[in-house]
Image (spheres, rainbow, N blue to C red):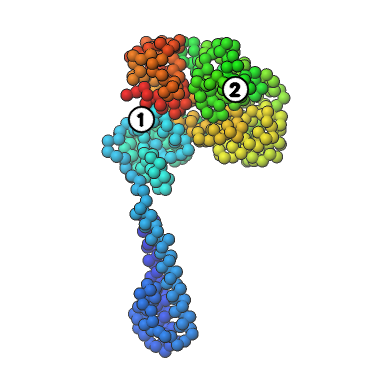
Amino acid sequence: MDKWRRRTVYYSILLTGLMLGYAVLYHHGMRIFEGDDITFLHSLQVVVETFTTTGFGSDAPWQSPEMNAFVILMDLTGVAVIFMALPVLVFPLLEDVFSTTVPKSIENGLSDHVVICSYTPRTDALIAELDSWGVGYVLVEPDRERATELYEDDYTVIHGDPESTEGLERAGLVEARALVADVSDQVDASIVLTAQEVAEEIPIVSVVEEPNRTAYHRLAGADTVLSPRPLLGKSLASKVTTSVTSDLDGAIDIGGDIEVAELPIHRGSRLAGTTLAESGIRERAGVNVIGAWFRGEFESPPAPEAVLTNGTVLLVTGREDQLARLKELTLSEIRRLEHGETIVVGYGQVGRTIAGALAEAGFPYTVVDRTAMEGVDVVGDATDPETLEAADIDEARSIILALPDDTAAEFATLVVRDLSPQTEIVARVEEAASTQKMYRAGADYVLSLATVSGRMIASTILEDEDVLSLDQQVEVVRTSAPKLTGQTLGDAQVRSETGCTVVGVERDGRVVTDLGPEFRIELDDEVIIAGTDEGIQRFTDFAHD
């Protein structure tokens, strides 16, 4: 409405100036060309009648061609000014009247919620985590159009400035559980300072893009400063560094000597091309396959006839030695480390972390980026085949796409797959929704920054829950299950109802992993479950009051 008022003022000034100007010209034109010495007030009356189309001809006919031409010009100007008012004033006013009204403050009664400032592509993953544990939230969005879109999409959002005390007060920060600042490093620092002024005792979580700025956010007053990008980079690098060894980086220890691990099947491995039943994984390695990702689609349990291909990611449980045996089966039988390097595309924070991890592991690599800088070996666009050819893509054993733009990453995946079908593609994406498209494009392993960020923030805020996996495609969580008390696992049908698998139960400080259908959940037990983010949310609704 403020913009509409400004437009109204500008339009009124323009209209008044035009009418006064035409009145002066008309007054002198009638005296000079028509010999009629009329008053200025009469001239203004004629101009107003012309502009408003309320009357014509009070002085007609005009004898001189000059006055007739002038009146024609005045008529056209009046019509133009009237039509100009429609898009400038009338339409915006009607849009304001009939458009959705976004709240500027939260509803009474909302408390113990999380204030999120403001909406980014990573926000959906965080909201999904909060929803899975029944924790409320409110988004503080300064952009009105975006706030309207979010409100119409059923987000809990208010239109306000997260850098102002008024905006945070209207978001109920005083009654909140925590505040999350995840916009940009400088804006986040400003939000933290404002939050300290509004509610100093409320925990503040700030997300930084550059880890070297962590100290400044702590000085501003943030209780926890998170940097998801380095974690994402290390995780992506580990998919390459462990693809030729039996190391089990990333395995999650759930207790009782049992671990949960995600193991991608690599190109040229002995398992690629077989069905799950034909693979003999249980007999050859002794592990339990509790789920699998097939081109971005998670199945739990996977069907025996499901075909294992490069890009299939197995979710398994077992002892360390059993997981090591399975890891051997998932590796390529043709170890090409000495014949090719890893290409790292993108040299931002994630790319630099990947390069550092590869260097530390002694892996040769080539860095490609669009900007020439120290550490970049090939300058060019990774979506251009010539750039990838300059980086020797046909000799590369693997390529890690660390591009911040999902569309560019998808196109680069298609180009790489066309140029070098044998090269393994490991990729990051910004939004979790892009993961499946990357698999369709030909990627072998994909991890989203949104997922890592959401889990990191949630694990900090949800003090009562224990998120065990931050940089995996599947989430592993230790939580209570009050509604399952007294039921056996067979009766509860957790897997069929939620898509999650109970991989362990902590009872009296001891983790039980030998679980059969007859195992009964007791009061105060904590269950360890593995599943997708959506599955965890279904389990929370299923197992909690």
Q: Nearer the viewer, residue 102 or 214?
A: 102
Q: Amino acid at mark 1?
A: Val
- Residue where numbered disc 2 is placed: 308
Position in image of residue 69 (x %, y %) = 48, 80
Quarter of the rendering containing residue 279: top right
Q: Nearer the viewer, residue 278 or 287?
A: 278
Q: Earlier in the sequence, mark 1 or mark 2?
A: 1
Q: Nearer the viewer, residue 131 or 310?
A: 310
Position in image of residue 247 (x %, y %) = 59, 17
> Mark 2 falls on what kind of element?
loop
Q: Is the residue 449 above or below the residue 103 in the image?
A: above
- Residue where numbered disc 1 is placed: 135
Q: Tell me the quarter of the image containing the C terminus.
A: top left
Count residues near mark 1 (Cα–Cα under 10 Å), then give few for <14, some for 14-19, many for 20+.
Answer: some
For the residues labelled 1 and 2, the Cα–Cα distance comes to 38 Å
Q: Residue furthest front?
A: 305
Which label lies toward us, 1 or 2? 2
Q: Residue furthest left?
A: 108
> Which residue is painted at 52% across and 32% down in the image?
448
